[in-house]
């Protein structure tokens, strides 16, 4: 018996194979991409709106906005601000911001690096768990808490330290004092900021140190190193740039801090490099201080100052993030 | 025939040959005692005074005692090692100092202002200078709750979508967006306030309100939620995703029904950390929320009080009563943050055990 050949004339249509995502997937991917782009959009919008508001002031001041150190609002008889006669320059505040933040970082780096080293290589498990939780908690303290603590608890001590520094290191140019005012100086603000950024630098350094390749650590021990010799030969070369990145993140945080500095710093509109004198500047605090009674034009100037602060912190943070992420993936 | 195995009675104890012996511990404690004694003698006999002198002399003494002792016992390398250990311990103690001091200050100064009426009344009829048994921070509690909820409603979808984009979709823009999210977490809080002012308050609403406060907080909250959820999603094993796709699921179904539910507790942790991050933000709220003294349940209109604003206002008022109010407010705020933190730790507990 032969099998009857299938004589049907039409072949079934070929099944279509494709790797094209379904509609649901395309919608999903689109929505997620949109959400992902939101950070770009928000950062862009911040720039555009602040620039838009501050445009007139920036145009009338030109480069003087960065280099000038006068903040002078001139009003005519009708109470309308005369933009051409007014002077808006942020140099004094810019210098003050950098000064406070630098003091903070200089104080915080050694403490946090030692702390991170202890937590990674010395501490028993129990102490390590408790300390890490405490430091994480400290990083979440609101800045107004640091401000109030700095004002009521730390300031008397910090003033005393400032007097000691002046007494023994007064011959250094930046510790020189022309007048005897130690209260609310950039040094005090720097100490408060240092306590704020110690948890940040510590946790980043700890993360970097704990990524040190284990084989190298064990190799160092096998060659007979003590713990310190191992740290010096292996951990520090590996983690150095990561610590620098962490310190820059701390710098960025310190530069953008508002309330904590506002409470402990005496804002004076002059360029002052002497860290112990009770007269300093800080961009964010200045914005908060002047905002209350500012007229429309002055608010525009404050927006421009906010733009400058935004760009400054963005640059510092970007450099810091590049350094930290490079260190994390380094396989030297 | 089976050989009889003799029963062994003695247990072998694990030993730790590297652990310090009793004698070494005694020597360490002796060194500390000697240094304390030496400190008191040195500070008492010389012109040095103050806590700083005690700390400095003690550090010097303990370093030199440890150095000499280790040098005599094991040579120069061990002596150097002892200096490093001493410094490391000193670093931790210096870090602990402000934490302990802050917690003590909050407890010590906050407890006088803690009255039950804090939770039942607002400051509508009272100034910050009134006696502590009048007025309260109900308006701040309500206002902060509303603003943080608004911020959460905005930043939760955006933050989690960003995290999903970074971990699941992995498009061309993954690296730049990761970078931008990191940079965004460094935006100063006052800039967020200025942005909301310039973008919404001045051109559209003209008046500050709780809604604006919520928007400003959302900007600060997005990066925290995005980064924490990204870390959480990265920990979900790749096998789960492959299993989902292998069963014929689309990417959307795999992620929404397998990956995200698997990461649920971690994502809740991300939300809690985000809330803790913004609950105490002061500067933007001073600029955009208006800071009312009465309970205001409508975020769209009228000034709205908040915890940070209440603390800020009481603190800047500057009288003993108002400052006691500020400390009491910060005490309660910190208790809330503390509770959030512990919840986050309990939920994400196994995540941190490496």
Image (tube, coloured by chain):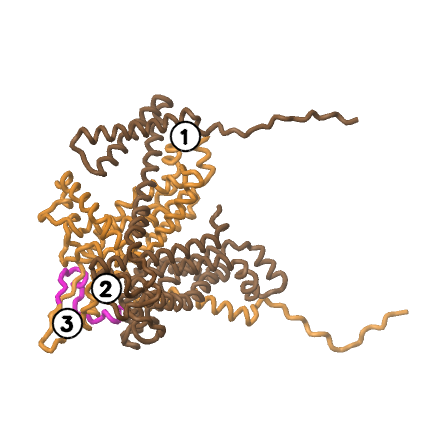
Chain colours: A orange, B brown
Asked whether the viewer can see residue B46, the reply is: yes
Q: Magenta segment, which residues?
A: A49-72
Nearer-the-camera pick, A117 or B130 = B130
Using the image, tell me which numbered label, if any, was put on residue A83: 3
- Cα distance between the residues tagged 3 and 1: 68 Å
Do the residues at discs 2 and 3 belong to one chain?
A: no
Question: To which chain does the residue with label 1 belong?
Answer: A
Residue holding disc 2: B130
Using the image, tell me which numbered label, if any, was put on residue A225: 1
Task: Point out the residue furthest to the top here.
Answer: B72
A237 shown above or below A155: above
What secondary structure predominates along the stretch shown in magenta? helix
Nearer-the-camera pick, B354 or B2 = B2
Check disc 3: other Cα within 10 Å, few if <14, some if 14-19, many if 20+: some
Answer with mark 3 or mark 1, whichever residue precedes in sequence: 3
Asked whether the viewer can see residue A312, the reply is: no
- Cα distance between the residues tagged 1 and 2: 65 Å
Q: Are marks 3 and 1 in contact (CB under 8 Å)?
A: no
Q: Position of residue A133 (x, y in %)?
A: 40, 48
User: Left of A41 or right of it: where is A28?
Assistant: right
A116 shown above or below B341: above
Q: Position of residue B12 (x, y in %)?
A: 58, 28
Q: Position of residue A48 (x, y in %)?
A: 30, 69
Question: To which chain does the residue with label 3 belong?
Answer: A
Check disc 1: other Cα within 10 Å, few if <14, some if 14-19, many if 20+: some
- Cα distance between the residues tagged 2 and 3: 43 Å
Task: Point out the residue furthest to the right here.
Answer: A1
- Name the residue rendered at 65%, 26% in the picture: B8
Magenta-colored stretch includes residue A66: yes
**Quadrant of residue A40 within the rendered picture:** bottom left
Using the image, tell me which numbered label, if any, was put on residue B313: none
């Amino acid at each position: 018996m032969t099998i009857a050949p299938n004589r049907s004339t039409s072949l079934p249509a070929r099944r279509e194979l494709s790797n094209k995502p379904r509609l649901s997937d395309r919608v999903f991917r689109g929505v997620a991409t949109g959400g992902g782009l939101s950070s770009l959009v928000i950062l862009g919008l911040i720039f555009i709106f602040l620039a838009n508001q501050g445009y007139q002031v920036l145009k009338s001041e030109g480069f003087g906005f960065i280099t000038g150190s006068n903040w002078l609002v001139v009003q005519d008889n009708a109470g309308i601000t005369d933009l051409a006669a007014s002077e808006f320059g942020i140099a004094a505040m810019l210098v003050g911001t950098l000064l406070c933040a630098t003091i903070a970082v200089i104080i915080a780096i050694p403490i946090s690096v030692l702390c991170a080293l202890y937590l990674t290589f010395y501490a028993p498990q129990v102490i390590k768990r408790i300390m890490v939780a405490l430091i994480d908690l400290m990083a979440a303290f609101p800045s107004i808490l640091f401000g109030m603590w700095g004002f009521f608890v730390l300031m008397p001590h910090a003033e005393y330290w400032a007097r000691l520094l002046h007494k023994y290191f007064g011959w250094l140019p930046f510790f020189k004092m022309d007048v005897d005012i130690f209260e609310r100086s950039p040094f005090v603000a720097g100490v408060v900021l240092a306590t704020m950024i110690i948890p940040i630098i510590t946790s980043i350094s700890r993360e970097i140190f704990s990524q040190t390749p284990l084989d190298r650590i064990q190799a160092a021990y096998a060659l007979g190193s003590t713990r310190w010799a191992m740290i010096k030969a292996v951990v520090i070369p590996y983690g150095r740039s990561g610590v620098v990145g962490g310190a820059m993140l701390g710098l960025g945080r310190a530069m953008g801090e508002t309330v904590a500095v506002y409470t402990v710093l005496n804002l004076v509109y002059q360029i002052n490099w002497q860290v112990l004198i009770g007269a300093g500047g800080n961009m964010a605090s200045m914005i908060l201080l002047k905002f209350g009674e500012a007229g429309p034009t002055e608010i525009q100037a404050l927006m421009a100052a906010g733009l400058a602060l935004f760009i400054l912190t963005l640059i510092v943070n970007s450099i810091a993030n590049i350094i930290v992420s490079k260190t994390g993936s380094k396989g030297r | 025939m089976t050989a009889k195995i003799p029963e062994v009675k003695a247990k072998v104890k694990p030993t730790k040959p590297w652990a310090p012996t009793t004698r070494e511990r005694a020597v360490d404690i002796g060194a500390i005692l000697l240094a304390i004694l030496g400190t008191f003698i040195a500070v008492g006999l010389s012109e040095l005074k103050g806590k700083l002198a005690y700390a400095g002399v003690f550090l010097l003494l303990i370093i030199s005692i440890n150095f000499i002792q280790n040098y005599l016992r094991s040579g120069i390398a061990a002596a150097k090692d002892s200096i490093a250990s001493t410094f490391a311990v000193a670093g931790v103690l210096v870090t602990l100092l402000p934490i302990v001091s802050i917690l003590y200050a909050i407890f010590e100064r906050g407890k006088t202002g803690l009255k039950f009426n804090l939770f039942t009344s607002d400051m509508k009829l009272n100034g910050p200078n009134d006696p502590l048994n009048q007025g309260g921070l109900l308006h701040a509690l309500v206002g902060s709750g509303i603003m943080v909820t608004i911020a959460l409603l905005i930043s939760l979808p955006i933050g989690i979508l960003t995290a999903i984009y970074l971990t699941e979709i992995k498009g061309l823009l993954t690296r730049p967006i990761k970078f931008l999210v990191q940079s965004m977490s460094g935006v100063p809080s006052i800039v967020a306030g200025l942005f909301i002012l310039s973008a919404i308050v001045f051109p559209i609403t003209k008046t500050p309100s709780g809604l604006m406060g919520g928007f400003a907080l959302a900007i600060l909250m997005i990066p925290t939620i995005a980064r924490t959820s990204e870390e959480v999603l990265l920990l979900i094993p790749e096998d789960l995703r492959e299993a989902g796709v292998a069963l014929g699921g689309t990417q959307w179904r795999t992620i929404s029904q397998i990956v995200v539910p698997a990461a649920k507790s971690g994502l809740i942790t991300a939300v809690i950390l985000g809330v803790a991050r913004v609950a105490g933000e002061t500067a933007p709220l001073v600029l955009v929320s208006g800071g009312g003294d009465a309970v205001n349940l409508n975020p769209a209109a009228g000034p709205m009080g908040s915890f940070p604003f209440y603390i800020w206002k009481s603190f800047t008022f500057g009288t003993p009563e108002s400052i006691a109010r500020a400390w009491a407010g910060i005490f309660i705020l910190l208790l809330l943050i503390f509770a959030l933190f512990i919840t986050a730790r309990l939920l994400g507990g196994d995540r941190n055990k490496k």
